Amino acid sequence: MSERLTNALKAERLFIPFLTAGDPVPEATIDLALALEQSGAHVLELGIPYTDPLADGPTIQAASKRALLNGMTLTQAMELVPQMRKQGLTIPVIVFTYANPLYQYGFERFVETASDYEIDGVLVPDLPFEESNAFAAKCKSKGLALISLIAPTSNERIKKIASSAQGFLYCVSSLGVTGTRKELHPKLQSFLDLVKGEATIPYVVGFGIGDYKQVEEMNRHANGVVIGSAIVEQIGKHEQALKKESSRLEAINEIKGFVQKLLYAPQVR
């Protein structure tokens, strides 16, 4: 695992925002990544737009559509990371993608390219843990962390997955696809207590986290949060402004303000 990711995961109250690469244009993704780091992000999760995103709800599906309409590919998405680094991004980047794009691209080629581009890890929600050994070994050989997902329905698999997990454990707060929710899974706390008993690395909660109250609640029961749809929804609202260089900064400042309220509501006036 990269030293960059190892050090980042020592922080308390981990904040891991999600962006879809190329949404709505590649230049905006780079500027948004830098803005999120300035807003306190410890790790960036960079989603690869895909036409059949089984784990994603309508908000991130719409983001993928916006990016794909601009021609974004897995190759171009990964190429954004060295461009972010060149402009000053220092936090780790975890690529969120699906098994089929990796199969098309080539698993070994992906690992080599990701390593060359200073990508720190990868998350593949439709790659079953039981079928991930070979890919996990390739990732490990190049210092990439293969991030594992655990859901409330994982039951007896929690111990098995936690025992060999790399980087951090990504706990899914709710069943179904991504997207903000007013109410989280009723058994979420007992699920997180089970994970806590097995985890030897940080564990964070994602899927459905969309307001300050939920962020605070999850920070009491886990090592941090992943926030995707709530931020992507803001990007969708500012799509036209983000596309134009002349109005991009103002839109990004609006999104930074939203993120600050999400993380620090009582202090933000």
Image (spheres, rainbow, N blue to C red):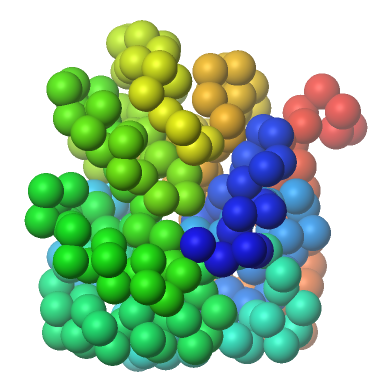
Instruction: Tell me residue 40's x, y (percent).
Output: 75, 50
Instruction: Tell me residue 46's x, y (percent).
Output: 47, 66
Q: Which residue: 41% across, 50% down? A: 166
- Number of marks drawn: 0
- The picture quadrant where one finds residue 32 is bottom right
Of the pair 252 and 141, the residue shown nearer to us:
141
Of the pair 255 and 188, the residue shown nearer to us:
188
**Residue farthest along the left direction in this orientation:** 131
| Left or right of residue 229: residue 81 | right
| Left or right of residue 261: residue 267 | right
Vertical placement of 44 versus 198: above or below? below
Instruction: Tell me residue 167's x, y (percent).
Output: 47, 50
Q: Which residue: 11% across, 48% down? A: 130
- The picture quadrant where one finds residue 176 is top left
| Left or right of residue 44: residue 107 | left
- The picture quadrant where one finds residue 85 is bottom right
- Whether residue 244 appears in this view of the structure is no
Vertical placement of 101 versus 19: above or below? below
Q: Which residue: 65% across, 81% down? A: 84
Quarter containing the C terminus: top right
Q: Which residue: 22% across, 79% down? A: 107
Of the pair 110 and 209, the residue shown nearer to us:
110
Instruction: Tell me residue 160's x, y (percent).
Output: 22, 33
- Whether residue 126 appears in this view of the structure is yes
Of the pair 160 and 189, the residue shown nearer to us:
160
Vertical placement of 103 versus 203: above or below? below
